[in-house]
Image (cartoon, helix red, strand yellow):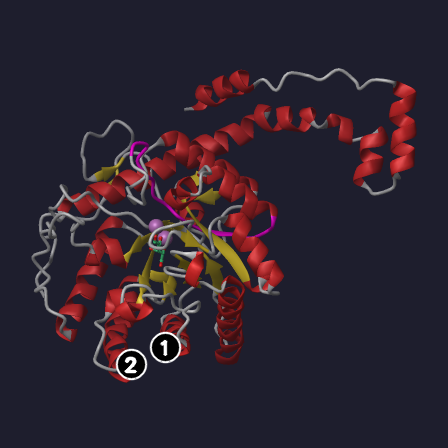
């Protein structure tokens, strides 16, 4: 097979002063930061869907992407070829991981049995390419939203047959993920939500969704799949209200249905902002519950209110993201997965490299800056100091559960008024961050 990117050689680290657009300025995979190599910290993953299946179409126009290796057909041969191109791209980029939906890699057939056969045929090539290159599968997932059968949802569909189809699809996608040595499996509830409550039995739909996840947990044990399960919050798009709307809603759902021990969260930047939160807020919510698993790294556009899935280049964003990730011990099973697409106007193959190089460099800088802020210690000391009243005396007694309401009342009655409050110093802290940017 002739190369798909003949003019591009392996992308190398050339340092901050390089003006070569096809080189890393900050991502130096073997450089040690805070005790680990950058490669180990960041665990970058390329997504199959946007990068190899994205066409650039939008509601007003057709696809624009130039992908000379793709014949546009739904043949197995084309799908296998595309898989080889994907591995050429990831090898040249130096990405250690990738992620897919079942339907990204192989075409849907006339029946589920035929579709499963198609998937096996492409999975064979994926396996061979993984072995040849050493690139690993970060997670697999099932696409339970594109096909018209999922119009009313998958696990939450009013049609029990659709639930059955989704369950069978998850079973197969999990088997293939297992076969490819995948380190995780993700559940994103693409259409698990509603457009109007007038036709929706919410309680029943949530019960069904939990049932589906329990079936997956049981099957995971049965086949001995050790990968981490993730659930990915998103508040809207495609439905008006999605049940997994944000990290807190996911955690509540998982806890309510006894699923929490089996799942961690996969937090996506643009989904956080659609939910009216910052990425860091969502990471903190997940981290505090010991459920911070992986991230889908991208960004939205301040002026647009939808999931634009742009590549992340904002250093503040990557710094705050890495600050929280480092605070909770770093990524272990998960990674920095670029769930991002090049703009419709960036239609040449080389744009895929520019996009990923930029995202990887932005995260490398975020990592280095966050590590420096943590090493400096002033930020953490400030926060620690801010809560000092809880470290001894009445505060410590309340925290340890040893103070009754009566005793607390007696304490404050005796004092008459609270100890003086101290400034929160937001501007001082923002300036402190800027010392490192
Ligand atoms: C869509 C989601 C999707 C998941 C995988 O908005 O981000 O791409 O990551 O199904
Ligand atoms: Ni995503
Ligand atoms: Ni998304």
Image quarter where the C terminus lies is: top left
Which one is nearer the viewer's eye here, 156 or 95? 156
Q: Is residue 218 left or right of residue 89?
A: right
Q: Residues within 10 Å of mark 1 (few under 14, many from 20)?
A: some
Q: Pointer 1: what residue?
A: 165
Res. 255 image quadrant: bottom right
Res. 192 image quadrant: bottom left
- Residue 112 has which mark? 2
Q: Is residue 232 left or right of residue 75?
A: right
Vertical side of 139 occupied by 168: above or below: below
Horizontal and vertical percent position of residue 325: 50, 42
Which one is nearer the viewer's eye here, 59 or 46? 59
Horizontal and vertical percent position of residue 315: 37, 31
Horizontal and vertical percent position of residue 148: 26, 68
Asked whether residue 55 is in view, the answer is yes
Residue at 55% from the left image edge and 48% from the top image edge: 248
Mark 1 Cβ and ligand 1 under 8 Å apart? no
Horizontal and vertical percent position of residue 120: 28, 78
Vertical side of 149 occupied by 406: above or below: above
Region in magenta: 289-303
Vertical side of 338 occupied by 128: above or below: below
Mark 2 or mark 1: name the one nearer the start of the chain. Answer: 2
């Amino acid at each position: 097979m002739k190369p798909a990117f003949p003019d591009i050689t392996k992308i190398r680290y050339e340092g901050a002063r390089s003006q070569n657009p096809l080189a890393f300025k900050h991502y130096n995979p073997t450089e040690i930061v805070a005790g680990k190599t950058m490669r180990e910290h960041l665990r970058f993953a390329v997504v199959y869907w946007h990068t190899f299946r994205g066409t650039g179409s939008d509601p007003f126009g057709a696809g624009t992407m130039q992908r000379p290796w793709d014949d546009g057909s739904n043949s197995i041969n084309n799908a296998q070829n595309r898989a080889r191109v994907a591995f050429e791209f990831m090898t040249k980029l130096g990405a250690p991981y990738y992620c897919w939906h079942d339907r990204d890699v192989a075409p849907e057939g006339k029946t589920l049995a035929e579709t499963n056969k198609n998937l096996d045929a492409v999975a064979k090539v994926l396996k061979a390419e993984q072995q040849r290159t050493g690139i690993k599968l970060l997670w697999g997932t099932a696409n339970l939203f594109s096909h018209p059968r999922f119009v009313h949802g998958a696990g939450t569909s009013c049609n029990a047959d659709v639930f059955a189809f989704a369950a069978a699809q998850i079973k197969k996608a999990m088997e293939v993920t297992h076969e490819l040595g995948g380190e995780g499996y993700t559940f994103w509830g693409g259409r698990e939500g509603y457009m109007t409550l007038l036709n929706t039995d919410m309680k029943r739909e949530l019960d069904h969704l939990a049932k589906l996840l329990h079936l997956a947990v049981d099957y995971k044990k049965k086949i001995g799949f050790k990968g981490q399960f993730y659930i990915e919050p998103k508040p809207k798009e495609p439905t008006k209200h999605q049940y997994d709307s944000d990290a807190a809603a996911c955690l509540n759902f998982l806890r309510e249905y006894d699923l929490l021990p089996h799942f961690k969260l996969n937090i996506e930047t643009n989904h956080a902002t659609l939910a009216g939160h910052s990425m860091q807020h969502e990471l903190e919510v997940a981290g505090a519950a010991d459920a911070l698993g992986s991230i889908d790294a991208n960004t939205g556009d301040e002026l647009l209110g939808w999931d634009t899935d742009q590549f992340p280049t904002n250093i503040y964003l990557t710094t705050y993201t890495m600050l929280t990730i480092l605070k909770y011990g770093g990524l272990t099973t998960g990674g920095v997965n670029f769930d991002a697409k090049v703009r419709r106007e960036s239609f040449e193959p080389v744009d895929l490299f520019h996009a990923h190089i930029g995202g990887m460099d932005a995260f490398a800088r975020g990592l280095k800056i966050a590590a420096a802020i943590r090493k400096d210690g002033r930020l953490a000391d400030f926060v620690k100091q801010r809560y000092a009243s809880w470290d001894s005396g009445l505060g410590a007694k309340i925290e340890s559960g040893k103070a009754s309401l009566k005793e607390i009342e007696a304490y404050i009655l005796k004092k008459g008024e609270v100890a003086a409050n101290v400034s929160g110093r937001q501007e001082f802290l923002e300036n402190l961050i800027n010392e490192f940017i």
